[in-house]
Image (tube, rainbow, N blue to C red):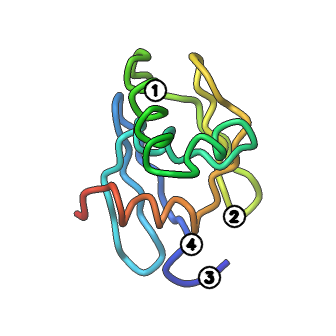
Amino acid sequence: MEGRESLTDLERGDEDCVLRFADGAAFTVSYLAIRCRCQCAKCKPRQENEQRLLEFEEEVARLRVEKPKAEPVGHYGIIFDWRTGCSSGIHSFSHLRRVAEELGISL
């Protein structure tokens, strides 16, 4: 994968991370934002409309904020392993870019 969606660096903090992309863009994104946009079969249906997404975000926000384990998946994504919940979703670099642009803070 080339271009703006290719993740070149993941700098992990305790409550958020910095995502750096091949086009030079960098964003600080909370783990809460990433987790609430998980695309796995269990989480994705809970984001199908605004009301369900709001309920899902509130449920996840009540859990302890945690720094997940992060495992690369080939050259296209990352699996975040959350001790208090989901760990089956693959977050593709293009998906992480969309989340970063929508919910992150541009650096």
Mark 1 in CB contact with mark 2 (< 8 angstroms): no
Q: CA distance from mark 1 to mark 4?
A: 28 Å
Between the C-alphas of marks 2 and 4, the distance is 7 Å
Labelled pair 3, 4 in contact (Cβ < 8 Å): yes
Q: Is residue 81 above or below residue 50?
A: above
Please tell me whether residue 98 is drawn above or below residue 77 in the rendered image: below
**Please, is residue 6 above or below residue 31 in the view?**
below
Residue occupied by mark 2: 76
From mark 2 to mark 3, how far is it between C-alphas? 10 Å
Q: Which residue is mark 3?
A: 2
Of the numbered discs 2 and 3, the one sitting upstream in the chain is 3
Q: Earlier in the sequence, mark 2 or mark 4?
A: 4
* Residue type highlighted by circle 4: Ser
Q: Crowding near pointer 3: few (<14 within 10 Å), some, many (20+)? A: few
**Which amino acid type corresponds to the residue marked 3 in the rendered image?**
Glu
Residue corresponding to mark 4: 6
Tag 4, which secondary structure? loop
Q: Secondary structure at mark 2?
A: loop
Give me the C-alpha separation between circle 1 and circle 2. Answer: 26 Å
Mark 1 or mark 4, earlier in chain: 4
